[in-house]
Image (spheres, rainbow, N blue to C red):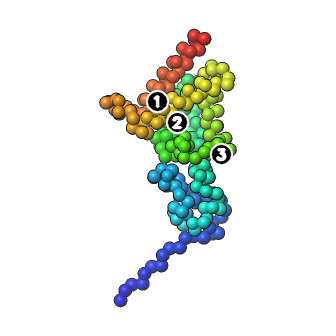
């Protein structure tokens, strides 16, 4: 006599979720996929399956996959901004600059796939004003530090250069490019610390010779 088979679990109706709860459930599922396999793995049907809802449920909040990715990128920028906000506010400008560079690289190491989505070309960020606003906050925070270092407003080119420095270190670390040219093991924290110090030395020299 065979044992009765257990009925397959049904997807939870979207109506069973409070409106905000459904969005949070979808985002949790999407962030799990993003963290494990990157942006290419994030699909509407798969997040619906993981959230236990119908395949149509995600479209209550997201018009398409790209709008979901934009939301994920925005949440990533929020977490990056929170790291910057948590840095000691009373440190002098140079120490704060180094701390920001280290926080940026550490974020990339902690959340590599979110970082790649935030700064990659998986979506057209200019099509999402809220994403542009949130991402701009990090840039403005860095601009404020550059001005505190004595760079005349608006300090746009210097801020871009500082961002490029930290971003370059993060990319080298994530893509394992350092060991291609350097035989000795390189500590990422020491690398970004040194890169920030070299940048500051160049900035001081530039200001001195003007």
Q: Are marks 2 and 1 in contact (CB under 8 Å)?
A: yes
Quarter location, residue 186: top left
Residue 90, horizontal then vertical, whole percent: 60, 28
Name above or below for residue 77 compared with residue 209: below
Q: Nearer the viewer, residue 210 or 1?
A: 210
Q: Residue at x 48, y 50 (%)?
A: 38
Q: Secondary structure at mark 3?
A: helix
- In the rendered image, the residue lying farthest to the left is 183
Crowd rating for badge 2 (residues with CA inside 10 Å; few <14, some 14–19, many 20+): many
Check residue 104 in the rendering and tell me which mark sits there, or answer none. 2
Q: Secondary structure at mark 2?
A: helix
Name above or below for residue 11 compared with residue 209: below
Q: Mark 2 or 1 closer to N-term?
A: 2
- In the rendered image, the residue lying farthest to the top is 209
Residue 195, horizontal then vertical, whole percent: 47, 26
Quarter location, residue 205: top right
Name the residue carrying label 1.
192
Residue 71, horizontal then vertical, whole percent: 61, 50
Q: Mark 2 or 3 closer to N-term?
A: 2
- In the rendered image, the residue lying farthest to the bottom is 1
**Marks 3/1: CA distance?**
32 Å
Q: Residue at x 56, y 60 (%)?
A: 44
Name above or below for residue 66 compared with residue 22: above
Residue 154, horizontal then vertical, whole percent: 67, 25
Check residue 127 in the rendering and tell me which mark sits there, or answer none. 3
Crowd rating for badge 1 (residues with CA inside 10 Å; few <14, some 14–19, many 20+): many
Check residue 77 in the rendering and tell me which mark sits there, or answer none. none
């Amino acid at each position: 006599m065979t044992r009765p088979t257990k009925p397959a679990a049904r997807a939870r109706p979207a109506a069973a979720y409070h409106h905000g709860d459904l969005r949070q459930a979808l985002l949790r599922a999407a962030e799990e996929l993003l963290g494990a396999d990157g942006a290419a793995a994030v699909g509407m049907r798969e997040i619906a399956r993981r959230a236990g809802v119908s395949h149509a449920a995600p479209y209550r909040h997201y018009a398409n996959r790209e709008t979901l990715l934009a939301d994920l990128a925005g949440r990533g920028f929020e977490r990056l901004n929170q790291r910057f906000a948590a840095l000691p506010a009373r440190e002098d400008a140079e120490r704060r600059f180094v701390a920001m560079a280290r926080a940026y690289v550490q974020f990339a190491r902690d959340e590599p796939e979110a970082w790649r989505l935030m700064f990659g070309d998986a979506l057209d960020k200019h099509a999402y004003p809220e994403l542009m606003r949130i991402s701009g906050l990090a840039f403005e925070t860095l601009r404020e530090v550059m001005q505190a270092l004595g760079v005349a407003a608006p300090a746009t080119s210097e801020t871009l250069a500082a961002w490029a420095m930290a971003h370059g270190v993060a990319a080298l670390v994530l893509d394992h490019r350092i060991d291609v040219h350097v035989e000795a093991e390189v500590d990422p924290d020491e690398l970004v610390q040194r890169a920030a110090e070299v940048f500051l030395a160049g900035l001081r020299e530039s200001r001195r010779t003007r």
